[in-house]
Amino acid sequence: MTIPLLVPPVADVGSEIGRHWSALQNALPTDLVSGALHLDTLVSTGIVAAVMIVMSLLVRRNLTSGVPGGLQNALEVVIEFLTNMARDLLGEEGARTIMPLAFTLGLFILLSNWIGLLPTHVMMRSPTSDMNTTFALSFSVIAYIWFMGIRHRGGAWFKSWLNPLTWIEEIPKPIVLSLRLFGNIAAGEILLVLAGALPAVVLTSTLPTAVWVGFSLFIGGVQAFVFVILTIAYYGTSTGSLGH
């Protein structure tokens, strides 16, 4: 079992890219793409899932049609905003079908993006800074979207693949979804490590690090939103409901 250094020297910050708390010997020279079991990813993913379950139970227990509590009100605002956007793109039926998946993905990705900003000294990273997670999310979404495309369009969906442009458009989708999310979140965590290791930052104040954390919170939210919007758009393209 290999455990990363708590505070790496500035010169070694580049080695933090793709570095994980691993339980198995790596099959490749780098942890970036390997057969290692990334325990930090598993732990942080479990924590995110637990938070989502607790949030769901709290909302369900206090659910009301009257004046909602703070958590219910916040979730209602977000869900209504995303649902209206999906309805404008896909119509009522399409929005009602895709929104449960899109919102759940968005919430999971948002919390996953933010958990790596906790001061755990790189012992717990964002699940979305691990390409195993981002590729799993992306391929799962694309597989579901293709399945729904077949269900809605039948033979017409398969016929569309006779056009070479369909291959050029569809095949890169899971790769683009995955690498965009991974790159932004992993880069943010690496820069936080760098900021914390710089002597000028350590000796003066925590203000630069705090500013970067705030910026990273914003970027984490933007990346979750982008993933949701692309999921909705890809669903509409596959099922033929986009613009209806």
Image (cartoon, rainbow, N blue to C red):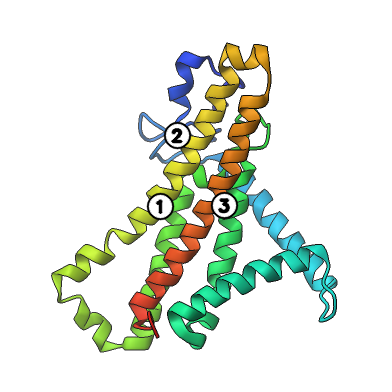
Q: Secondary structure at mark 2?
A: loop
Which three-letter amino acid code belongs to the residue tagged 1? Ser
Which comes sooner in the sequence, label 2 or label 1? 2
Residue designated by label 2: 18
Which comes sooner in the sequence, label 3 or label 1? 1
The residue located at (58%, 67%) in the rendering is 103
Please name which of the two marks, 3 or 1, marks the residue nearer to the observer: 3
| Residue 45, above or below 239 | above
How far apart are labels 3 and 1 at the CA level?
Answer: 16 Å
Which three-letter amino acid code belongs to the residue tagged 2? Gly
Q: Residues within 10 Å of mark 1 (few under 14, many from 20)?
A: many
Could you say where residue 152 lies in the image, as x and y percent from the top left?
37, 87
Residue closer to the observer: 223 or 155:
223
Residue designated by label 3: 221
Could you say where residue 97 lies in the image, as x and y percent from the top left?
52, 81
Residue closer to the observer: 71 or 182:
71
Please name which of the two marks, 2 or 1, marks the residue nearer to the observer: 1
Q: Is residue 126 left or right of residue 32?
A: right
Could you say where residue 186 lies in the image, as x and y percent from the top left?
48, 38
Residue 178, labelled with which disc? 1
